[in-house]
Image (tube, grey):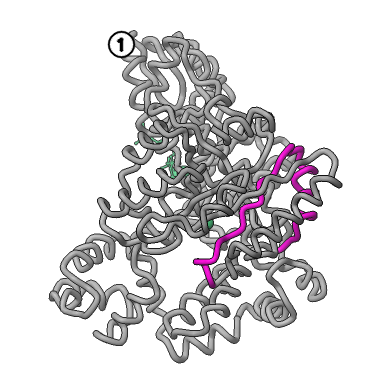
Amino acid sequence: MPMHNAEIADAFEDLADLLEVEDANPFRVRAYRNAARVIRSNRRRIADLAAEDLTDLPEVGEDLAQKIRALVETGELPALEEVRKRVPQSISEMMRIEGLGAKKVKALYEGLGVKGLEDLKQAAEEGRVAELEGFGEKTQEMILERAADAAEKEQRSLRNDAEDVAEPLLAYLEAIDGVKQVELAGSYRRRKETVGDLDILVTAERGTPVMQRFVDYDEVAEVASRGDTRSTVHLRSGMQVDLRLLPQVSFGAALHYFTGSKAHNVAVRKLGRKRGYKLNEYGVFEGDQRIAGRTEEDVFASLDLPYIPPDLRENRGEIEAAREDRLPDMVRLGDIRGDLHCHTRYTDGHAGLRAMAEAARELGREYLAITDHTQNLKVVNGLDAKRLRRQMAEIDRLNDELEGITLLKGAEVDILEDGDLDLPDDVLQALDLTVCSLHSKFDLPRNQQTERVLRALDHPAFRILGHPTGRRLNQRPPLALDLEKVMRAAAERGRFLEVSAQPDRLDLNDEACLLARELGVQVAISTDAHTAADLDLMRYGLEQARRGWLEKKHVINTRTLKQLQKLLQN
Ligand code: DGT
Ligand code: CA
Ligand code: CA
Ligand code: ZN
């Protein structure tokens, strides 16, 4: 059974974590992390690629290719086994606590000898953590709060990882003779940014061996329960899957029920009760009479509601909006005309300007902003004014030559600790746009962090706030920032916020998108592409924008180039 991309990526991430604790060369740590990212987001199954093909992947040279082969063939990564001899493996458990990075974990290990979550909890309870240099009462409390979570809760899967697992399984089920409908409900269908487990609903002709085939699926590691109408398994990737076999007459009701969210269901049921109906996963009932249930449309129609798309079913006002016929006309992928954040070989991207431009054109984009990092970010060889000027000249030359796509001259400008921007004003003013981002000092107190961003917003060259909260799903919590204040200021000054489509960022998230809509700030949905293939990540950002009720008019990269340029000049 070949390894999943996610499993390979996890091994390299573990390696990077442990090396970081060991204080290894940061470039090496970064190389493994980048490789993990490339592997995780690759469409093809890495385990099926030959050694030569592996080096074609961005970030993967001879050395890494060899490590990947070894891992795929033996199930072990020798370099990882080596570090594990030096650093207890359980140490990386501690990194699952949001907010505890390698540096802090290392200090805890060396200073207190804590080797894992259990040790750490005990040390915190005894008050020893607060006494350690660089830690205090607040950190200790945070650890106590989050350690229990980290121990219990399996991490939720990122949406794109869940897709890698779900899509082949759905195809497998659909191919079974006699199977009629297969739908994946739950948070997956609502396009939530992370997924706890997969909830699959199936209808089939009588006598179809659905359950048998399900538990026989190649990727099943363990069958947790098996029945005639419901089974639960755990896949090798760690994902839990519930499968329910349903009669046709209640498929729509079940699909609605198991799509959720729970809060949405509760609100819909209440609405039904007001009319004297009973709603459950079998249908809508008036007395003993089933009045709806075959399709979701029927279920909504029985309550005089139009169809509510799954993306909106979070009980955030969608039922009232549906009743009053003012559901949002959510932005679609086809509305997107350009991409306003990407990197090239000048810094930490893996393709040149031309290759990025051609890939964007291939996807139907009309414009692409090149936004490499700036000088403060040394680890990626950030651009100083001189190198940026050189890139700008190259963009001018390319624009003369290229048909069907326009490159915009931009930069992802570091916001410095005091809110200054990381390039001289004259070069900033010469750019078509800036994406201004926080890449350091994540732990400033909320007031100070907010002031820092507000100051940056005041700079005349500021255009878009990149990945505003800095969160990395399953890795780093959002930084303390008064988003409402920032949004109000952005709205006043005609600035924009980014919705990063990077699957582990999705930042702004859905709720923040709703707030942006309410406060009248427009957003840019951007891929932050580091490879040509990354330009196709757009849909992940789009999904969260849709969950946040955003429409075409709220998203600046749905504008034509001319309209956008006007908006940016303001
Ligand atoms: P997840 O798996 O944590 O990402 O989130 P969901 O939304 O997929 O939740 P899950 O798998 O526990 O259940 C799937 C759906 O089934 C959920 O969205 C709504 C429905 N459901 C489950 N339990 C209940 C319940 O106790 N009451 C109601 N009203 N609905 C429920
Ligand atoms: Ca679920
Ligand atoms: Ca479930
Ligand atoms: Zn960035």
Q: Is residue 359 left or right of residue 41?
A: right
The three-letter code of the residue at mark 1 reads Lys
Residue 67, compared with residue 550, is above or below; it is below
**Which segment is the magenta one?**
350-378
Side of 452 relative to 340 (left or right): left
Residue 440 in the image, given as x and y percentages of width and height: 41, 63
Residue 196 as seen in the image, left or right of residue 488: right
Which of the 4 quarters of the picture holds residue 350? Answer: bottom right
Q: Residues within 10 Å of mark 1 (few under 14, many from 20)?
A: few
For image coordinates 56% across by 51% down, the residue present is: 428
- Name the residue located 27 percent from the left edge and 63 percent from the top edge: 148
Specify the quadrant of the image occupied by residue 11.
bottom right
Q: Residue furthest left?
A: 126
Q: Is residue 232 visible?
A: no
Please say whether residue 397 is visible from this viewpoint.
yes
Query: What residue would you read off at disc 1?
Result: 274
Q: Which residue is depicted at the point 47% across and 75% down?
A: 17
Q: Which residue of the protein is positioned furthest toward the front in this rendering?
A: 426
Considering the image in quadrants, where does the N terminus appear? bottom right
